[in-house]
Image (tube, helix red, strand yellow):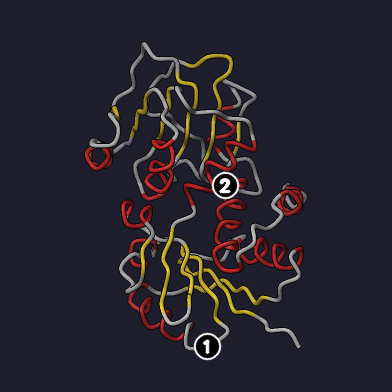
Amino acid sequence: MSKIFKLGVIGNPIEHSLSPFIHSRFARYENISVDYIAYKVEEDNFNEFINDFFANSLSKGLNITLPFKKHAAEIPGSLSEEAKFIKAVNTIIRHENRFLLDSTDGKGFMEDLKLNKIDITGKNILIYGAGGAVESILYRIILDKPKSICIINRTQQKASRVVKKYQSNFQIESSINIEVDYDVVINGSSAGLTGAFIPPGKIKTNNKTCFYDLNYSLDKTPFCKWANHYSSNVFDGIGMLVNQAAYSFQLWFDVFPETGKVLNDINSLKK
């Protein structure tokens, strides 16, 4: 009888996570037996849960979502350079008797840009939001050498903190330049998840501007509805979600799973 590996995602809230669906599909298509469960965990029980979960010898790894990504970066183990810099972890891998800690969000985001033929090298990038979701992709965005990056946040202090953190790597602006045509507009704020998306200021775009929402929903997100007034090049975070999951799966099983079929499976669920 083949081994059934234990996997999961922990967060709070977690009820609407698509991760169990995605990883179960990956495992089915790759002929690997897994039991992948979404776990709702209270913040003061995080360390206890980690210890209990990995007490089982068949526990292969965990995905980490809000509000635990910063907590996971403090687990004793080997941090990837990316996770160490952004101080956040979304994937725990048990390797022999130690933990490997990584973040696959940025790689998943860049992979989805590539699949959608969005090239950010030499381009002007505008980002709404300055929280953990934005930090998780900013590391990879900078590696692709855009022309400019502007981060806008309703709390200016938060945007300034992110700008300061990356200032030795890239000159990031924290106010919209009305002279700049923005080529890619990214929403990393969760403020517009309900109701209408209200942009923090007027922006200048061109007929090729792409809009990307890091949030995802089986319905069209408020940001995507707003962006459709500017462009038909509008994308939500489903592709990033599937691709960051694929990179996690690869870390656990040393195989990069088929993502196209899983994306089709999810799109068939959309309303």
Mark 2 to mark 1 CA distance (whole Å):
30 Å
Looking at the picture, which amino acid does disc 2 mark?
Met
Task: Please name whichever residue, 156 or 140, is drawn nearer the observer in this view of the structure.
Answer: 140
Question: In which image quadrant can residue 154 be found?
Answer: top left
As drawn, the label of residue 240 is 2
Question: In which image quadrant can residue 236 be found?
Answer: top right
In the displayed structure, 217 sits above or below 171; it is: below
Q: Do the residues bearing badges 2 and 1 touch, measured as CB atoms within 8 Å?
A: no
Residue 153 spot, x, y in % from top left: 33, 36
As drawn, the label of residue 56 is 1
Q: Which quadrant is home to the N terminus?
A: bottom right
Residue 208 spot, x, y in % from top left: 58, 18
Residue 67 spot, x, y in % from top left: 39, 62
Which one is in front in this view, the residue at disc 2 or the one at disc 1? 1
The residue located at (69%, 52%) in the rendering is 259
Task: Say whether disc 2 or disc 1 marks the residue closer to the N-terminus.
Answer: 1
The residue located at (27%, 39%) in the rendering is 166
Classify mark 1: helix, strand or loop: loop
The residue located at (43%, 61%) in the rendering is 102
In the displayed structure, 8 sits above or below 148; it is: below
